[in-house]
Image: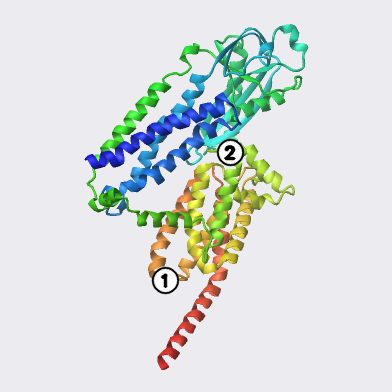
Amino acid sequence: MKDKINLLFVPFVFTLVGLTLGYTFLHWIIFIELELFQLKDIIISFGIPIVLTALAAWFILRPRFKILNLEAKNGNWRDFYSAIMWMAFTAPLLIAQQYVVSATGKLTELNSINEINNSESTKYYTIKNFFIDKFAIGLHSAFDVSGKNNESFNMHIYVALPIFESLKDTTILEPKAWFGIEYRKTISNRLEPNEKEKKYQEFAKESELDFEHKNVSEFVYLDRIRHSDKKEGYIEAIKANPKYIPNEIILEPINEPFEARNGKKLEWIIGSSIIGSIVWLIMVLVPKIDENELKRIKEGKPDHKAQKEFQEFVGFLKPKKGYFITPILINANIGIYLIMVVMGFGFISFKGQDLLQLGANYGPLTKNGEWWRLLTNTFLHGGLMHLLANMFGLTFVGSILEPKLGKLKLLTFYLITGILASIASIWWYEAIISVGASGPILGLYGIFLTFLLTKIFPPEFSTSFFISTSIFIGFTLLMGLAGGIDNAAHIGGLLSGFIVGLIISPIIKNKQKIKRLKKTKKATLLRQD
């Protein structure tokens, strides 16, 4: 028990405390106190924390799991333990980022809104003299999807109103700041486009009714909006105002005491840390110890197996003979996603308008001459989970097909089936924003399925992989039928890949036959010698 606690529990606690305090301090000093540079809130408060905790769980502490006997009949429990540790690290760290923003936010008292540019820029404000012009409205609607499988469709209506010192100042064309109100509603992304439109119209009417009865001058204090998707929504609303010159000082009303701004965040940080630590302690104490691994760790000997596993993981991203184009495609997709994150488009998900600007497939634009969208959309993804799911599928099918096809054929078929999948999308759907590598990936699966049926691969290989591949394809198409997913691109990619496979299968089989004959002939000559 002592060895388990010293090697697994104590490092867990130190890492948990170190990550929570360390990154929260860096968040405060870099992004709040010194404001060295700007990133979107979702990256600072969510993206960076989950990456840091994943690195700590998988690459720092996971190797120590070897001292526990986590073997099972169908594998081992190491991935499960890693996932639990990652969640235990992540929960308090995410809450801490919300806490540090509210807890360190200063409240500035202004006599007039005209003083806001001449005072220190702070998070919160109270204002004695102000006038909000409720009739000078700027509106902007925005939509995004969320959830593990993009099952939620989020509708936003941003309302921006100019703030002046008094009614007579409304003749000034550039207000000192803007008053922001956000209306938000979430519906199922599985609904058909006409049903979504109906739900949006209902939501718009509800929001309009609420706004008509709202006294915008009644609030306790104002919250200055930081760099985020919300701020971008307000800026678009401000730009829609036909009368006044826009600026980026946006204040949202808060109708609760300033002392209550932190809520119970601190209690949740402490509570989630304690619960995570207790759960981890129980998980550490239950399994038996692997004495050989314990001895190796105590003696400081390297874990060659772990090093090999890491090299194999990195190998999936590194081009090499027989596996050259697949990692390039994977890296290209990941690289484009990271560029979008760095440019501030988002992290977990991206807005449809941004995807359109970057090259998403959209019938009205594509058919109007922007045919390049048929290809560019296959390198864009709607968010993190979309990317990870597709790259996992590409890694599997690419590693099997590339040795058979060769790098140039694999790349050619990937691009062709991707374009055909995009064509199927704009043919089937009148106007949806379509992105993702699912089309060309299912194109490769179509080729793979043909190879399995035409016995390109050995019988024992074909039998096992035919079942698993059919289940994967069936599940993918079934998910698409639920709505909110471009199933036309899936089917278009799969069918085009299947046809390509039927065309090239005889060529592949003939090459294999010639290769076998050459081997047989060579073996015969060697025996004769």
Q: Quadrant of the C terminus?
A: bottom left
Q: Quadrant of residue 238?
A: top right
Q: Is residue 483 above or below residue 451?
A: above
Q: Is residue 382 above or below residue 459?
A: above
Amino acid identity at mark 1: Pro
Q: Is residue 341 above or below residue 228?
A: below
Task: State the separation of the CA atoms marked 2 and 1.
Answer: 43 Å
Amino acid identity at mark 2: Phe
Looking at the image, the residue that sits furthest to the bottom is 528
Left or right of 60, for residue 392: right
Question: Residue 20 versus residue 393: which sits nearer the camera?
Answer: 20
Question: Residue 208 versus residue 81: which sits nearer the camera?
Answer: 81
* Dot label at residue 265: none
Residue ID at (54%, 10%): 220
SS at mark 1 in the image: loop
Instruction: Point out residue 5 in the picture as x, y percentages from the top left corner.
Output: 26, 38
Q: Which residue is mark 1?
A: 458
**Residue 161 appearing in the image:** yes
Q: First in sequence, mark 2 or 1: give its number.
A: 2
Type of colouring: rainbow
**Residue 494 appearing in the image:** no
Q: Which residue is mark 2?
A: 350
